[in-house]
Image (tube, rainbow, N blue to C red):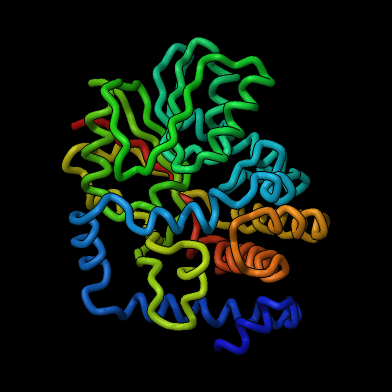
Amino acid sequence: MNLAIRLAENGMVPDAITRFGIKRLLLSRLANEQTRENGKDGIVRTMHTGALAVHTENANQQHYEVPTEFFKLMLGPRLKYSCGLFESSSADLAQAEQDMLALTTKRAKIEDGMDILELGCGWGSLTLYLAEQFPTSRITAVSNSTSQRDYIVSQAEQIGLNNLEVITSDMNDFDTDNRFDRVVSVEMFEHMRNYHLLLERVADWLKTDGQLFFHVFCHRDTPYFFEVESSADWMSKHFFSGGVMPSYDLPTYFQDHLELKQSWFVSGQHYARTCQHWLNNLAAHQSLALAALGQSDNPEPDHIQFNRWRLFTMACEELFAYKGGTEWHVGHFLMAPK
C-alpha cells in the first residue's frame, strides 16, 4: 500500500489504475465502518462529549492556508470550495456555484434586513453572495484562516460592500454576544466533533425566531471519523485529520437545543461533477498551480503537493459518483430553537 501511494503521489500511476484502487479502498472502508463495534451508537456518544473540534491546526495546513492563488486556479470564479448544483447537462462550474448559492439562500429562508452569521466561510462565496443579494442585511463570517479573511475583505472592498464583517477564530474559541436571524454553515460541520456542544452554542446565538441552515457531505446511513489507523487512511492523514463523515440522519440525534424542521437530499452526482471540474482545472493550469504551491509553507516538493490534490479531487469524484450519487451525497438541514 505504501509503495502504491508513493508512486501515485509522484504521478507514476495512470489515472485509470488509480481510480480502480480508489474504488476498492472505498468499498473496503465502508465495509469496515459498517461492521465496526458500537458503530453509529459509538459515534453519537463520542459526539456528545469532548472538544468542539480536534486537530484544527491541521485543517489550516491541509486546506485553508494553502495559497489562495492555488484555489483561484482549481475552483470556480466564486471560489466555492464545496458542492455545486448542476441543474442541466450543459451547466459549467460558474453556473453550478451560482445555482447552489441560490438554493442555499432559498432553503435557509434568508430575507433582506436579516442579521446573518456564517460559520466556516471559506473564501467567502456565500458571505459575498449574501452581502450582494441582501444589501440591508448584516453578515458576520467566521473562518480560522487569516488568508481567507484577507481575500474576503479585499473582494468586498473591490465590489463596494460594507455590510459584512469577517472574524478569524478557531471554532473552539469563537463566541459572540450578538444574536442572529440565521446561522448558516456550508461544509464546516464535517470538521466538528462535538455536535451537542456546537448546536448548544448555535442555539444561544440565534434570536428567538431564528433558524440554523447547514450543508454537509454525508453517507446515506453510516457515520465515521477520519482517523489515521493504517497506511490506507491517506485521506485522513493529508486532508481531513480529525474530521467526520456524517450520516444523513446524524442531526436527528442532536436535538436537545435545536429541533430539525426539514432536511433535503442532494445527489452525490452534483459533487462528483464539481470535483471533475476541479480536476480539469488543475490539468489546465498545472504549471501555475505548481508555482502557487511552491509559495506555501508545506515542506513537501511542489509536485508531491500537486499530485496529492489531484488524488484528492479524483477520490472525491469517485466517492460521490458511487451508486449514482446515492451512497455518499450532500444533505441540507434546517433547525430552529425548541
Query: Which residue occupies 33% across, 57% down?
Result: 54
Q: Residue at x 24, y 79 (%)?
A: 37
* Left or right of 241, for residue 9: right
Q: Where does residue 89 sit, x and y in percent of width and height?
A: 74, 49
Please, is residue 109 above or below residue 242 in the view?
A: above
Could one spot residue 314 in this view of the protein?
no
Quarter the C terminus occupies: top left
Pinpoint residue 205: horizontal percent, then vertical percent. 27, 28
Q: Residue at x 71, y 51 (%)?
A: 74
310 with respect to 64 (left or right): right
Quadrant of residue 44 within the rendered picture: bottom left
Which image quarter is the N terminus in?
Answer: bottom right
Q: Position of 256 compared to 311: left or right?
A: left
- From the viewer's side, name the closer residue of 159 and 331: 159
Q: How many marks?
A: 0
Q: In the displayed structure, does residue 150 sit left or right of residue 40?
A: right
The x, y position of residue 11, in whole percent, is 74, 77
46, 335: nearer the viewer: 46
Q: Position of residue 104 (x, y in %)?
A: 51, 34
Residue 64 visible in the displayed image: yes
